[in-house]
Image (cartoon, rainbow, N blue to C red):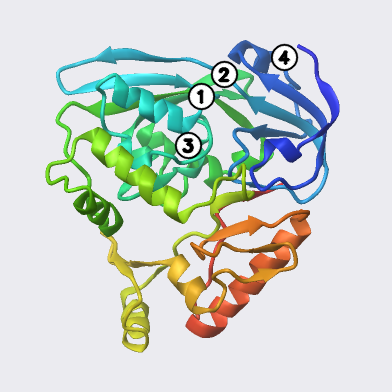
Amino acid sequence: MTIQHNVDLRAFNTLALPGQAAGYLKISDPAQLTAAMPGKERRFILGGGSNLVLTGNFDGLVLHMAIPGKRLLKEDADAWYIEAGAGENWHDFVQWTLQQGWPGLENLSLIPGTVGAAPIQNIGAYGLEAGDCLESLTAWDFEKQAFTTLDRDASRFAYRDSLFKQQGWHLSGRMAITAVVFRLAKAWQANTRYADITQELAVRQIANPTPQDIAQAVIAVRQRKLPDPAQIPNTGSFFHNPVVDREKADRLAAEHPTLPRYPQPDGWVKLAAGWLIEQAGWKGKRLGPVGMYEKQALVLVNHGGATGNDVKQTMAAVQSDVRARFAVDLTPEPIFL
């Protein structure tokens, strides 16, 4: 187990931002964590780097989670329980479960990142969140110097949120997720609540979609809207969809009749951040080397040579313009390091 020093992190974040790690260690086995900087030294747990904004050099140790492995852990009359290592590519894992005949994650196809990072952000798309299917996760607790297991309830999932973010562990490096177990129900039902997916299936003339049909529809929609980070560096959706009270949502809808609104079970209303950003004039607009994608205003892109400071300046400008027009605050999704 050899720690590398002064490692360039540009290749380890999908925005291709510059920055060096004072120390870097690739974790391919959970046992490595038991010897990796016990105590209070600064550390950062890195997954696929698809939800990360580097703001400069990092003076601690980056632990790059690359633990492999995926298997059917068990099954009962109601569900399959699938375990995957934290370093598994998320999209590849989803497609593998479908190939094995274990549906349930198809709406989360083509989301970048790793399995271990999925619960932290509680990734979601097209009517499904990772937390909906999570059975449990295993993590190394640096403070307690022990492995711990958290079930779905203990993980405290919310919209793009989890215990890891609520406690700040994703920034402090207190815990490193090593494996995740998903419960995939055998009584599968197609989730086609979102219009984009329904329309794509209609174009394909599919009235009774299989899990694979939905996965392919999701992939097609995402490929039309989102740039490939290998071609245009980005982190996918950059802002959370804001949630406002019903009174404010009704007032905004009266002023802007085409505003997309999604009522939530708790009575609040989710708004489409991409629509707000586009109406504020930012679709395809750039500020220096950073701008909002021409095909999807919710995606912030690096046109080349950007720094973390460039990203923060563009982010602030977008937030200011949306606030001025709609009195709505946008919160960024990525982690800033």
Q: Nearer the viewer, mark 2 or mark 4?
A: 2
Q: Quadrant of residue 137?
A: top left
* Cα–Cα gap, marks 1 and 2: 7 Å
* Cα–Cα gap, marks 4 and 3: 25 Å
Mark sitting earlier along the chain (3/2): 2
Which residue: 26% across, 24% down? 102
Do the numbered discs 1 and 2 sit on residues whose CB atoms are within 8 Å? yes
SS assignment at label 1: loop
The label number, if any, that marks residue 311 in the structure image: none
The residue nearer to you, when weighing 252 against 107, is 107
Q: Total number of numbered labels?
A: 4
With respect to residue 287, does 86 lie above or below? above
- Left/right of residue 76 with respect to residue 241 in the rendered view: left
Q: Nearer the viewer, mark 4 or mark 3?
A: 3
Residue 15 percent location from the top left of the image: 66, 48
SS assignment at label 4: helix
Residue 54 percent location from the top left of the image: 73, 47
With respect to residue 279, does 237 lie above or below? above
Q: Residues within 10 Å of mark 3 (few under 14, many from 20)?
A: many
Q: Residues within 10 Å of mark 1 (few under 14, many from 20)?
A: many
- Residue that carries the numbered disc 4 in the rendered image: 35
- Left/right of residue 169 with respect to residue 98 in the rendered view: right
Residue 304 percent location from the top left of the image: 74, 54
Q: Residues within 10 Å of mark 2 (few under 14, many from 20)?
A: many
- Residue that carries the numbered disc 3 in the rendered image: 118
The three-letter amino acid code for the residue at tag 1 is: Glu
Q: Nearer the viewer, mark 1 or mark 4?
A: 1
- Left/right of residue 218 with respect to residue 237 in the rendered view: left
